Image (cartoon, coloured by chain):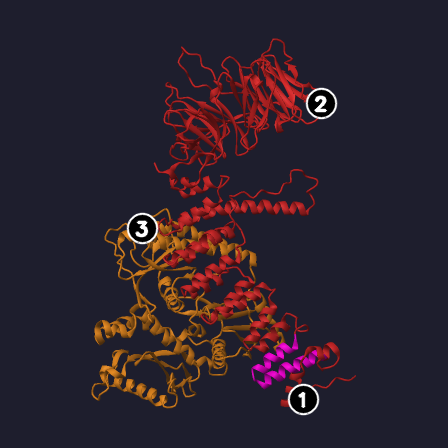
Amino acid sequence: MGEEDYYLELCERPVQFEKANPVNCVFFDEANKQVFAVRSGGATGVVVKGPDDRNPISFRMDDKGEVKCIKFSLENKILAVQRTSKTVDFCNFIPDNSQLEYTQECKTKNANILGFCWTSSTEIVFITDQGIEFYQVLPEKRSLKLLKSHNLNVNWYMYCPESAVILLSTTVLENVLQPFHFRAGTMSKLPKFEIELPAAPKSTKPSLSERDIAMATVYGQLYVLFLRHHSRTSNSTGAEVVLYHLPREGACKKMHILKLNRTGKFALNVVDNLVVVHHQDTETSVIFDIKLRGEFDGSVTFHHPVLPARSIQPYQIPIAGNGFCRGVSAAVLPRGCVLTMIFGSHIKSYLWNLQVKLEPIVNLLPDKGRLMDFLLQRKECKMVILSVCSQMLSESDRASLPVIATVFDKLNHEYKKYLDAEQSYAMAVEAGQSRSSPLLKRPVRTQAVLDQSDVYTHVLSAFVEKKEMPHKFVIAVLMEYIRSLNQFQIAVQHYLHELVIKTLVQHNLFYMLHQFLQYHVLSDSKPLACLLLSLESFYPPAHQLSLDMLKRLSTANDEIVEVLLSKHQVLAALRFIRGIGGHDNISARKFLDAAKQTEDNMLFYTIFRFFEQRNQRLRGSPNFTPGEHCEEHVAFFKQIFGDQALMRPTTF
Amino acid sequence: MAVAAAGAGSGPWATQEKQFPPALLSFFIYNPRFGPREGEEENKILFYHPNEVEKNEKIRNVGLCEAIVQFTRTFSPSKPAKSLHTQKNRQFFNEPEEHFWMVMVVRNPIIEKQSKDGKPVIEYQEEELLDKVYSSVLQQCYSMYKLFNGTFLKAMEDGGIELLKERLEKFFHRYLQTLHLQSCDLLDIFGGISFFPLDKMTYLKIQSFINRVEESLNIVKYTAFLYNDQLIWSGLEQDDMRILYKYLTTSLFPRHMEPELAGRDSPIRAEMPGNLQHYGRFLTGPLNLNDPDAKCRFPKIFVNTDDAYEELHLIVYKAMSAAVCFMIDASIQPTLDFCRRLDSVVGPQLTVLASDICEQFNINKRMSGSEKEPQFKFIYFNHMNLAEKSTVHMRKTPSVSLTSVHPDLMKILGDINSDFTRVDEDEEIIVKAMSDYWVVGKKSDRRELYVILNQKNANLIEVNEEVKKLCATQFNNIFFLD
């Protein structure tokens, strides 16, 4: 297996900590992604390391018994430590607040605390075997205030920090799940739902294990993931992951089934909106993307792994004096974390973030349309997509035109979505809704938005330079991109049109160019019209095409006059400017110059007389003003036609 | 063929009048180098129509032409005589390849009058024929020959005089019968191409279709796309497309009646291969793809004869009103398998595309508004892209091109065109014709526009205004000086 084949890897900077032992207790807080190393119950020190902060927090606390659970509130404001099954101790980490510990006992009598979760920097939930209790911590008073509680039998619980949802397992089979949602001092009970357990032999009592459930946010939606093991009684081919969608409002609904096609022990991660399933026996992982098209049976969509199973790329950790050592996977935590342990003389543990590598996937997914669908949903996709585009236009890996068209269409679909969002935002701002509506947010430009300049700079400009490419293919690709942009009603930038023209001109395909212009495939613009003018010596009709374009632009009347004058079509220029009613503002000198250059005296006479009449009409005198700088023309006129030919001022 | 006298004339003899339109008297091709010595003059003649003419007369006629050309050359070495006017007929000369001369002799139209004593009096109308029209017809004869046979020189190289004579005989024997000299007019001078108006998106779809087909059927070298007998795309160069377009629209398409339009029980429909997926069919090549013995023979055409000299098979495939010409190198013989593949690739796509175009066209037509019959008729031609548009001509048929205006008006148009040709500069000519007609010709930057207005008691200023209005509505997206 080549190195470039691994599509999962561990992050560069893992959190490193001492292995747990009787003296050193290690805790992991998923909400803050912090690892707590508690030595001797805290008496000899507590070290807290997070993935983001380089500076670990270390402090000391009195050894008041074995620590069962330890977690910081959000922003590390308050530390909560559970040492007994009835109470939780608190300690403020806010400057100027007392650092003396204070304690809260659970309200429900005879209840045991299963655990606790921080839902904000000062709000905490106790989960007991008889229900949940929602408290507000008042650090300055060193006390807690019960906000709300709810009684029900709890087997186990699970917390999703991103969505602030707690899931409680109830009933004997443990498979009825009751979610609660927390926000700013409120606790709301969401509709409960039941996980269908696979049929089991009569001898064993089926039950839902905590290990088989995970919660994660995928594409902005909260899902409960249930790992349904292979049951011998059913004829399914292997284990599967069932995704229950847990909406903010409304009932939970079974939406997706991920087919694992194998049996054994599994672990789940969600990384970059992908569900990663690790298989212990084979030490390989597969990924699923629920946005990719699957088989829909009317209520549930079935998905297969996007790619063939692969191991996570081995990570080599340098160890002083000992060369390198291989990491051994020990535990997988949802939300993208992997714990590993290294055995040997230096026993150390590491906490990693799992990452998806996109480059290897390009070669593992032969279907370019599906590949694009996949890549466009990934966070860091831009450069990879551009390289896919370049690759499909390269000589060795050249894709067929329908495939290229599909890729362009997918890119532009995403591009158009962004443009539309941007436009409606701009319109809303203009309409002054920005203050009234808090929902109005400037659309985020993700990496999946590849605009014309991206495609031009990174893909097309290099592509058209390739000498070995048949020009037919080059033109077909450019036209396909332009077609796709048009199909999504995106205005095509002139530099793309220039690229088409350049390519056609290089291969002397002027008639093709003419036809494209005739059907306005290359949109009108001043730069394009000027480019056409410059082609006139190679292809005379370009002159006519350019003039037509300038005419259609209707903002280029000055340019039309210039073009006509440069062709010595002085009369035509004058007639044109008069036709559009601009003849009172034109420079007489410019026209007289051009007329003089034709060496056609009668033409000069006509033009001269026209301006004399204009002077008469505008100023009441046929004479030119000094500001018009026409002295030499007047002299020239007199020289040829005589003084008496000058127009006389009309006297009333 | 006599056309019944139109009773438009006046005078007491009108009812007795009989008109005979211009007719082809003879047509011959010769090369003076092939029989320079006395007694060998017959060798010069490569083709002579009518063939029944006695040998000596053929030699005499050829000799006369040769002499006239030689004689006039002394006055104008670079531009020898193009035509010779006589009372009864007019001769047109054309030298398409060096030393190869083509001559067409056309009899002037005749009016046969009944004199008072009852004897018929024949009157030749010497001034009726327009030189430019018939010179163009003669040039077209050569272009058409070259399209299907290549140059004279190439035939000489391939098989000497004998082969050339054989090819000329084979081609012109049939082709001359299709020359309808009585209905030649301004459009023959232009030899233009009518382009199908289309929106950008549909046009891009067609582009995409062509590119994909050329990719999947990689032996296709050039493609041309037509809809409703109007051109949309040509991969061929302009001059080659011009003559191919002429062939398609005046010969091939009219020969193939739409089977879609034919009744359910019509025999044409029965011949259609039982294909339910699409409406595609070959206009050249195999009629029925299910017949294993179907012949895959396509007409050969010659293009780019000035440089690359390419010989191609012409495959014309049509679905509903959309026709596509695929041209493949003549060295590759298309097989029945290839034809089936083409049918399966192109047929369904073209059927969809054809209905897309039709739909789009109807939308555009509705948007521009169904104008009521306008007060004018016009012919437009652009020398740069050969675009031609005529509301004067009703419809091209294999036999005649029908015009909706009086021949006299058509002649005025021809005269104006001759005037335009003489000067390089842009100009405008307004003619008051008989009855209430005004004829306006405008020339601006290699574009020509001819308008026929029928307005009672209109004066010059009003006519000028009308034409301005017409330009503003019909030609607002081009630079057309007024």
The span shown in magenta is A587-615
The amino acid type found where label 3 is placed reads: Arg
Q: Is residue A203 visible?
A: yes
As helix, strand or loop, the secondary structure at mark 1 comes to helix
Which mark, by number, is residue A645?
1
The amino acid type found where label 1 is placed reads: Ala
**Magenta stretch: includes residue A595:** yes
Give the quarter of the image for residue B214.
Answer: bottom left
Q: Which residue is mark 2?
A: A140
Chain A rendering hue: red
Say which residue appears at 71% left-offset and 82% top-offset.
A622
Could you tell me which chain the residue with mark 2 belongs to?
Answer: A
* Nearer the observer, B481 or B466: B481
Q: In the rendered view, does B35 fall on the left or right side of B398?
A: left
As helix, strand or loop, the secondary structure at mark 2 comes to loop
Which mark, by number, is residue B341?
3
Which quarter shows the C terminus of chain A?
bottom right
**Magenta stretch: includes residue B402:** no
